Amino acid sequence: NRSCGGEINLKPILYHHGASYDLETTIHHVLKNHAYAEIYLTGISMGGAQTLKYLGEKGNDLPKEILRAAVYSTPCNLHSSALTLKSRSNTFYKNRFLGKLKAKIRAKAIQFPELIDLELLEKVVDFDAFDTHFTAKLHGFRDAEDFYKGVSADNWMPHIAIPTLILNALNDPLLGPECYPIKLAESKREISLETPRRGGHTGFVIRGEEFTYAEKRIYDFLIKP
């Protein structure tokens, strides 16, 4: 994702849950420059949401080399996920994520000072305000609500046309009820939804094991269907 590699990108935008265009650009580059017969996609958290959105956007027009996909700890519905960060029990996550995002906005302000109001940034204490004044503004949305509705992966998931695993733990503190697309998975054979009781957000640790349950399960789903 833009700005996640330790160096801020040169565009006035950052990245967000709906930024499937970056994934599409990467896939296009790979297919153009390498002779891969098979491609498998996987994503974690925001990366999972971007993957699901991309798959749904492409639908039956997905490159034939992409055979399967698997995501985990994925906010399928962004508004539902955003609501969880208002919970007092999620104060730690809210402060951590918000702090990191503020740091990236400060770096972006050095590049594009005319776009960023740093005084307003210091007054922001929650994601509704941050997403309204910064995420939405930078990426062409009206406000936080418009942004959440406009980029949420579940807008496109009904159009996914390849076998896709969604692995979301029931005790994931960052996923609301709508992030578990039970009805869609029941009615759409391409989507497999698995909801272990434990796993947290991107956890799934197995005591004494090198690989997590999520890594093992995704490998089995992608490589050994």
Image (spheres, grey):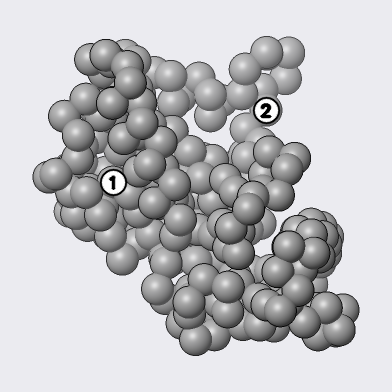
**Residue under the image location 35 percent in, 54 percent down:** 53
Q: Nearer the viewer, mark 1 or mark 2?
A: 1
Q: Which mark is residue 182?
A: none
Q: CA distance from mark 1 to mark 2?
A: 28 Å
- Image position, residue 70 (x, y; %): 39, 34
Q: Position of residue 97 (x, y in %)?
A: 75, 59
120 shown above or below 109: below
**Residue farthest to the left, as pictured:** 60
89 left or right of 28? right
Q: Which amino acid, mark 1? A: Leu
Tell me residue 161's x, y (percent).
Answer: 17, 43
Drawn side of residue 77 relative to residue 135, left or right: left
Nearer to us in this view, 76 or 181? 76
**Residue for badge 2:** 205
**Does residue 108 sit above or below 218 in this rendering?**
below
**Numbered disc total:** 2
- What's the residue type where badge 2 is placed? Val
